[in-house]
Amino acid sequence: MKRAKIAALCLIGLLVLVPAWGRQKRRANPVNTAAAQTQSVNETERDTSRINAQMRKRPIHYVNNDGLNVYVDSVTGDEWIDSTVITSIPKMEYPLWDALTVGVNVWDPIMRIFGQHYGIADAWVELSMHNRYKPIFEVGLGTARYKPSDMNYTYRSPLSVYFRIGANYNFLFNSNPDYSFFGGLRYGLSPFSYSIDDVTIGPGYWDETTSFNIPAQHITVGWFEFVLGLRVKIWGPISAGWTFRYKSILHSGKAPYGKPWYVPGFGAPGAISGSFSVSYTLPLRRLNKSAADAVINADTIPDLTRGSAAAPAEENTVPSDSITVTE
């Protein structure tokens, strides 16, 4: 009887201890998956503050001329700036209202001296925004008188006005503003009139000639231009540059006696033309809240603090009294 009691007590003890031992074993051995192994890395991979905190435990550091902490790895000698205190670097170095430029196209007047039969001159004004985006407005006068040597008529277009409006994009927007390489778009419009005089029909059957005039026709023509240009500083605020134009007629009024040979501002037939301009640039820095930082040397490092009163260093050495060893 005693043996039966002892056996029963042992069986009850096993029933109590085995589940408890199983539960303890499961708690001591968590599931080890790939996600669990990389979770801590993923959480801190892009955490700059935590990374810098870990790196500060190792190196020495000093304060540079801009007032920023520069850390030096005591093993490798690598240097870096504490990125948690760096302000964002501006995308554009020049202010919103940068400059106003006024120019005159001198190509047509010069070519008239050498026998060109059309054109007078035009002027333009351009607003520089961040030295990058440059809206432009052009206005000019044009006239034409042309008698082909192998034809029997004279084309005439009296003095007429034309307009062009568009914008340029400066590809060198963060470089020295004295040099500009740009592309742009234009829309041109000109209301004008033209006539064809002294049209002569040669001898016919009776050996007679007939002459007549086509009366003045009033028409409005609009066109599109794609421009590519280069402008450089000559002296002080004076600059000069070339502009090449690819152009195409967009719309034209009705012309019962044929299309015009010359359109003021557009020129004679042909898709390619050019101009040479002399311009004067007026800075607009007073319109901005703060003065623009001039970018003279492309190899210099921009001031990341923008307004710090740090004095320039005489030598590129680390002051011994400004080094702090962090344990």
Image (cartoon, rainbow, N blue to C red):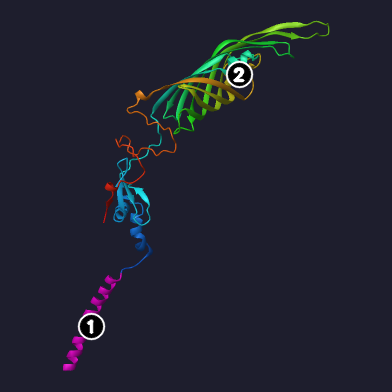
The magenta region covers 1-29
Instruction: Decide whether residue 193 is among the magenta residues.
Output: no
- Residue 191 percent coordinates (x, y): 55, 14
Instruction: Decide whether residue 12 is among the magenta residues.
Output: yes
- Quarter-of-image position of residue 305: top left
Residue tagged by mark 2? Answer: 267
- Residue 74 percent coordinates (x, y): 34, 55
Main SS of the magenta segment? helix
- Residue 197 percent coordinates (x, y): 68, 8
Marks 1, 2: nearer the viewer: 2
Q: Earlier in the sequence, mark 1 or mark 2?
A: 1
Location of the C terminus by quadrant is bottom left
- Residue 82 percent coordinates (x, y): 32, 47
Q: Is residue 262 rendered to the left or right of residue 11?
A: right
Q: Is residue 47 rendered to the left or right of residue 140?
A: left
Gap in angstroms between the C-alphas marked 1 and 2:
107 Å
Residue tagged by mark 1? Answer: 14
Pick the front one: 261 or 292 = 292
Q: Is residue 208 rendered to the left or right of residue 280?
A: right
For the point 35% across and 45% down, the residue is 317
Judge whether 75 appears above or below 67 on screen.
Answer: below
- The amino acid sitting under disc 1 is Leu
Location of the N terminus by quadrant is bottom left
Q: Secondary structure at mark 1?
A: helix
- The amino acid sitting under disc 2 is Gly
Q: Residues within 10 Å of mark 1 (few under 14, many from 20)?
A: few
Judge whether 8 appears above or below 242 on screen.
Answer: below
Q: How many marks?
A: 2
Pick the front one: 49 or 219 = 49
